[in-house]
Image: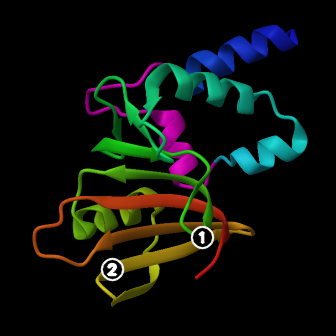
């Protein structure tokens, strides 16, 4: 099989258009769950990095001068509606994260189901709730949300360099 054929297969299976139905966007889910790493791809010159950039450009639009992108069409990851995508960093974390339309508790349950393991180091303070789990060297899955009774969004991310 030629390199072009492999790239075409990757593009069609990993980086398809966003899905508005329950199936979700598998490429984004793999990044969120730390199964794939754009940082590793960047270090090795992996062609999936270019495919990811093309996928993000096709599916999301930058929100003004802000550091996040919004879906061009309704998009789902892990069963949750995507509100914002942070493809490089958020705060002190470098990685890939998505703000989803889900309470902290609901997002935590789904992440633990998807991982097959519980999140660890759960904490609440300073108006925030958070949990995390190191899933590989230089890969920490984190869940964060405002600790407010009416909050219905949560930030899920895979961080490569994470300052606590």
Alpha-carbon neighbours of circle 2 within 10 Å: few (<14), some, or many (≥20)? some
Q: Residue at x 45, y 24 (%)?
A: 59
Q: Residue at x 33, y 80 (%)?
A: 129
> Does 121 appear above or below 101?
below
- Image coords of residue 139 (percent x, y): 66, 65
Q: Is residue 147 magenta?
A: no
Residue at the disc numbered 2: 129
Dot 1, crowdedness within 10 Å: few (<14), some or many (≥20)? few
Q: Quadrant of residue 148?
A: bottom left
Quadrant of the frame with the C terminus: bottom right
x%, y% of residue 154? 31, 61
Q: Is residue 110 visible?
A: no
Q: CA distance from mark 1 to mark 2?
A: 16 Å
For image coordinates 54% across by 35% down, the residue present is 27
* Element class at badge 1: loop
Q: Secondary structure at mark 2?
A: strand
Residue 21 image point, x, y percent: 26, 27
Residue 130 seen? yes
> Residue 18 magenta-drawn?
yes
Q: Which residue is mark 1?
A: 92
Vertical position of residue 15 compared to residue 91: above or below: above
Image vertical order of residue 69 relative to residue 111, above or below:
above
State how the image is colored.
rainbow
Is 36 left or right of 137, judged from the image as shown? left
Comparing 163 with 67, the one in front is 67
Q: Which residues are magenta?
A: 16-35
Placement of the N terminus among the 4 image quadrants? top right
Q: Residue at x 72, y 30 (%)?
A: 48
């Amino acid at each position: 099989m030629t390199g072009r054929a492999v790239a075409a297969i990757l593009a069609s299976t990993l980086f398809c258009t966003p899905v508005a139905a329950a199936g979700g966007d598998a490429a984004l889910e793999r990044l969120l769950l730390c199964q794939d790493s754009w940082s590793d791809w960047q270090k090795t010159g992996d062609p999936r990095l270019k495919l990811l950039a093309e996928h993000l450009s096709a599916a999301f639009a930058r929100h003004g001068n802000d550091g996040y992108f919004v879906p061009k069409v309704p998009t789902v990851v892990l069963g949750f509606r995507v509100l914002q995508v942070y493809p490089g960093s958020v705060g002190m974390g470098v990685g890939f994260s998505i703000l989803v339309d889900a309470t902290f508790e609901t997002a935590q349950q789904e992440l633990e189901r998807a991982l097959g393991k519980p999140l660890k180091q759960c904490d609440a303070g300073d108006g925030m709730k958070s949990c995390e789990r190191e899933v590989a060297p230089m890969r920490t899955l984190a869940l964060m949300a405002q600790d407010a009774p009416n909050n219905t969004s949560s930030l899920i991310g895979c961080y490569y360099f994470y300052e606590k």
